[in-house]
Image: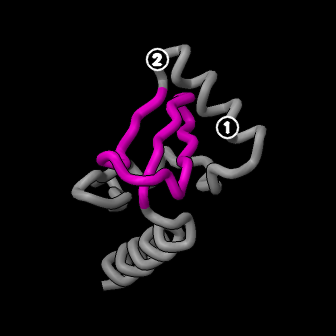
């Protein structure tokens, strides 16, 4: 079974099957989660120096920062799922 990947901006790609949540970075609990991940060495900064617009939480405990809006990533995931469903039907 091939990995389902999603582009999170600027050539960075993550495994779609490992993503638990995609949230905005503004809330205080999310900021604490990012700081905790940084301290534990589980933070992946994929913003390429740009402003963080989405925080992805994975099932492995890693936290990924992205410069792409959460809605955009969600649409890319949805589009990837529809392509996979079409491939399975064929």
The boundaries of the magenta stretch are: 43-67
Q: Provide residue 36's location: percent of width, then percent of height.
A: 63, 22
| CA–CA distance in space, label 1 to label 2 | 15 Å
Does residue 35 sit above or below 31 in this rendering? above
Q: At 28% from the left edge and 52% from the top edge, which residue is drawn? A: 12
**Disc 2 on helix, strand or loop?**
loop
Circle 1 crowding by C-alpha within 10 Å: few under 14, some 14–19, many from 20: some
Quadrant of image for the C terminus: bottom left
Q: At 42% from the left edge and 72% from the top edge, which residue is drawn? A: 76
Left or right, residue 41 beside residue 36? left
Q: Provide residue 84's location: percent of width, then percent of height.
A: 37, 73
Q: Provide residue 9's location: percent of width, then percent of height.
A: 33, 60
The answer to which of marks 1 and 2 sits earlier in the sequence is 1
Q: Nearer the viewer, mark 1 or mark 2?
A: 1
Left or right, residue 23 beside residue 6? right
Circle 2 crowding by C-alpha within 10 Å: few under 14, some 14–19, many from 20: few
Does residue 69 sit above or below 66 in this rendering? below
Residue 22 lies in what quarter of the image? bottom right
User: In this orientation, which residue lies closer to the viewer: 59 or 87?
Assistant: 59
What residue did someone put label 2 on? 41
Residue 4 lies in what quarter of the image? bottom left
Q: At 42% from the left edge and 78% from the top edge, which residue is drawn? A: 79
**Disc 1 on helix, strand or loop?**
helix
Q: Which mark is residue 31?
A: 1
């Amino acid at each position: 079974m091939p990995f389902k990947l999603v582009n999170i901006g600027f050539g960075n790609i993550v495994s779609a099957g490992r993503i638990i949540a995609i949230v905005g970075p503004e809330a205080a609990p999310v900021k604490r989660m990012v700081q905790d991940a940084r301290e534990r060495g589980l933070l992946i900064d994929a913003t390429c120096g740009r402003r963080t617009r989405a925080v992805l939480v994975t099932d492995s405990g890693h936290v990924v920062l992205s410069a792409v809006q959460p809605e955009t990533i969600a649409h890319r995931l949805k589009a990837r799922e529809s392509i996979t469903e079409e491939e399975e039907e064929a």
